[in-house]
Amino acid sequence: MTHNPFDAELERGMRNRRQILGDAWVDRSIGQANAFTADFQAFITRYAWHEVWGRPGLDRRTRRLLVLVITASLGRWEEFELHCRAALAGGEPETRPGIEEIREALIQTAIYAGVPAANTAHAITARLLRDLGASDLPQAADFAAAVAPRPATQTRHPGTGEERRTAAADGPVIAYSLLPPQAARADGAPPRTVLLSHALGADRMMWDDLALHLARDHRVIRHDHRGHGESAVPPGPYTLEQLADDAARVIDAELPPGEGVLFIGLSLGGMVGQCLALRRPDRVAALVLANTTSGYPAAARAVWRERIDTIHRQGLGPIAEATMQRWFTPAFQLAQPATVARLQRRVASQDAAGYAACCEAIAALDLTEQLPRITCPALVIAGAQDQGTPPEMGREIAHRIPGARFELLEGAAHQSVLEQPAAFQAVLRDWMATLSTPR
């Protein structure tokens, strides 16, 4: 039998410990060991840093965040400070969570472990950021920026964005929200500004998931059409040109002259996008038209007139219920009844006069012959089971717009972005990768 002096478990634990805390801190801890503490140092190196930290089930960033949450929850402030400093600037960079991730972990702690614990954890973290911001570390500027003065009244919910309004002087007030990009684009190009335009009867909320997906590396604007959500409800009827001009005023408020957005519109939003691209081509750099049409035959126009009459007589209740049957496939209605019920409440709670006024704009839609004038890159998305705007309508749009791409989403009816969100995002991202740098 041979004796192996190399203690693999101890060495693995020491490797992990250094990767998380950094050489300087570990060298100091080990260097301070004595006859009384040496066994404990070996114990935690083996069992904490190898047996636990060495398990592959969670990545190192996640384990760092868990330690911060647990130590804050238990009030183990010396251990919290040690791991918070290391999470910000110690150990290997690829294992460190970002400042935003640490902030979110501490906010989550406030709900489940108490505000006092989160308050102390925030104070300690802010102090560490100030100290590190004054250091010569490469990321010192980021640390200093994280604790720059900012009034609490100027905070925004990172999931919905900053609430804004257009000026009332040049038209009805249009409510919109702005989500800044969370990180730089992987290709190094500047972030695009994306504008999301919702369906008839919906509001900005229908875009929540896609907005967060796009805001990973793009600037995202969402607005409520006039007569919807939090926007004004001027007397109707409305025209599609008015709705397009409302969107243009939002863009004008946020972008310098000559810069265009990636406009993504679904249903009514897609109609608005077509009209805007024709009226203000300088403001539309690229166009995504989902579950929409460029015009209706006479029979369909008569159906819109009947809908308007129904609203005037009975309100939006009957319309809201029928809308869900068109928006979603039977399978989705069965699988996600709570989602369908929420959207039905949204339609039913809209301003009836504003809804009817937008119906007037849709009933008059007639853009098909003008579509060849749209010269920006365009993507047309249709739902295979969409009865309101069947795939043939999308194919016609794609045929008329020079160079447009057509994509059909299986298992989707009219609200494809809600019914097949992963497929919608994949098609959108794949097409966006073909676009040139935003102008």
Image (cartoon, rainbow, N blue to C red):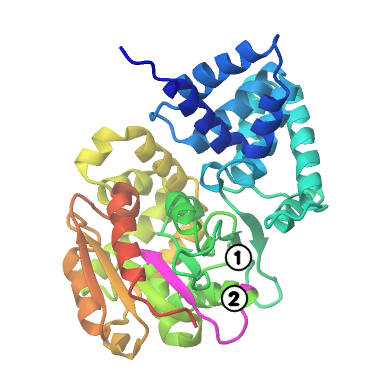
Q: Residues within 10 Å of mark 1 (few under 14, many from 20)?
A: many
Please state which amino acid type lies under the numbered disc 2. Answer: Arg
* Residue located 22% across and 74% down the image: 298
| Residue 3 sits in quarter | top left
Dot 2: element:
helix
Q: For this rendering, which residue is in front, 283 or 82?
A: 82
Residues at circles 2 and 1 in contact by the CB criterion of under 8 Å: yes
Left or right of 127 on screen, residue 318: left
Left or right of 174 on screen, residue 209: left
Kindly tell me whether residue 53 is visible in this rendering. Answer: no
- The stretch of residues the image draws in magenta is 254-268
- Please determine whether, in this image, residue 272 is positioned above or below residue 267: below
Nearest to N terminus: mark 2 or mark 1: 1
Which quadrant does the N terminus fall into? top left
- x and y percentages locating residue 39 in the rendered image: 61, 11
Q: Which residue is mark 2?
A: 249
Residue closest to the far bottom: 373
- x and y percentages locating residue 82 in the rendered image: 70, 30
Please state which amino acid type lies under the numbered disc 1. Answer: Ile
Residue 174: assigned label: 1
- Please determine whether, in this image, residue 382 is positioned above or below residue 241: above
Q: For this rendering, which residue is in front, 262 or 174?
A: 262
